[in-house]
Amino acid sequence: MSCIFAESSKSAPEAATRASLARFPEESLILGSARAYTRNGLEFYQRCERIAGIVQTRFLWKSAYIITDPSAIADVLVRNPGSFTKPYTLRRLKVLFGDGLLTSDGEMWKHHRRLVQPAFSSGRMHAFINVVRTNTKEMIASWRDGEVRDIYSELVELCLKNVTQTMFGIYDDELADLVQALAITCHELMRAVFDVIRPLPFRFPGKLQRRVEQQLEDLNHYLGRLIDRRSREPERNDFFGLLLSGLDGHEPLSRQEILDESVTLLLAGHETTTSALVWSLYLLARHAQHADKLACELASSLRGEAPQESDLETLECLRATVDETLRLYPPTHRIARTVTKPVMVGGHELPTGTDVVLPQWAVHRSSRWYRESESFMPERWSAAFRKSLPKCAYFPFSGGPRTCVGAQFAWSEVAVILGLLAQHFRFSLCDHAPLMPSEGLTMLPAPARLRVKLELRSATASPRLSTVRSMALPGLTCQAGEMF
Ligand code: HEM
């Protein structure tokens, strides 16, 4: 895979160094820093980053450390993952995700992760990319030169289709409706959990709780029919097939475990990639010069086609565009854990029971690691820069054993879709107000729309992409190596 995360996670972590430690300066007696956080969580994280590598604070009674020092982050994720568990906030979401990969810990997590890992192996990447290419071409077949479209919901549908076809071997309207309803419910649960000033005690409001239960029951019925259908078909080693088969020497998964893992994958596997795509198209629309440069690279190498797996390593400008988008708008904008036994982090001992928050949002925008850190500058991602960046100064997919299981697929999916869209269309924004990131399980823009005017890059090009191979893109001829 051609993202810096892969390079970082393979190599051994650098030796631990001592991080600066400070107390958040404006804590109130009762709320601690909860008010500063609820006023603007993203700004709060950036403020902490400017104060020290580790900022000690308190949200009401709950003690927490906001960690932005890359070496201290590696202490949590890579060097000592066994001293942490998933945090209270994520554990509250078990009402929806049960004991799926995202929320479980210990032996159960280890067993399930080993079970599903082959579904994300590099051997399955080729087939996955073909699905992504076909679905993307199908999506843009109806896009016309000069029209105004809200492409947000189309991108949601595309990412959902890619993940369900590849991981479950199916896509239909019923499944799409079920997952989208669950996604809305998930946002409401998150809002309730993260309202730190009024955290809900132990149970969610009755109406919300009943809705979750009903939606999970509906999905369970759907999966039951899918299990029946799959039992009449030859075995497959996609994600769902692996859940049904179980690991040698273990009991097969229960229906509840299959449901938990399915909900987790359906939600984690489409909103994140949608977020990356929405933000990357938004950034391209705002940086027309870079969009032209990218289109030029794509057209000269691909001649109208969608990228293949083998193209992704060599398309420097595409690679840099995806990495820069994930830097500025990481779909998972913070990771959290709870300390389960005393542990050294950044040279300081953290006590059992405290929470640690590792905000990608603030680390990726730190001027310590990124020149003009708030600017969209894909050209910063030279080979030398990638090499010089400390581990965990860039971690959109996390790191260590809890690294995103779908990282390689997700990065490639975003690159393939962007490689086709950016090659064929120029996007201009129709709404003047800037898109604002909204903190949820995934960092999606608010409002949930992306209204753009589409301009076909070739006057002669037909949007019916069955003919794209022969398409020339006039005005976009460029020399190899001209990109940076
Ligand atoms: C750009 C897209 C994506 C980003 C930025 C992303 C990011 C992340 C991050 C940061 C984590 C770690 C969370 C934590 O430790 O608390 C994670 C976990 C996870 N992600 Fe992704 N993800 C993406 C796409 C996907 C896709 C496409 C899938 C599945 C098809 C997926 C499935 C999962 C699962 C199941 C976990 C839990 C893994 C475990 O703990 O074993 N993600 N993701």
Image (cartoon, rainbow, N blue to C red):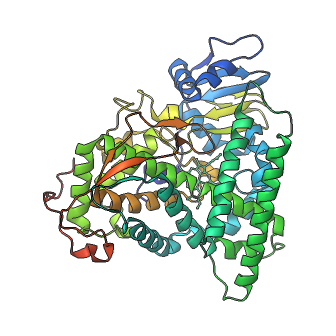
> Is 72 drawn above or below residue 95 in the view shown?
above
Q: Is residue 357 visible?
A: yes
Residue drawn 63% across the image and 78% down it: 237
Residue drawn 43% across the image and 45% down it: 279
Residue drawn 81% across the image and 75% down it: 249
Residue 220 screen position, x and y as percent: 78, 67
Tell whether 123 sits left or right of 302.
Answer: right
Tell whether 443 sits left or right of 328.
Answer: right
Occupied quadrant, residue 189 = top right
Quarter placement of the N terminus: bottom left
Tell whether 347 sits left or right of 158.
Answer: right
**Front one among 171 and 235:** 171
Residue 314 screen position, x and y as percent: 30, 61
Residue drawn 80% across the image and 49% down it: 95
Occupied quadrant, residue 478 = bottom left
Residue 321 screen position, x and y as percent: 35, 49
Residue 366 screen position, x and y as percent: 45, 29
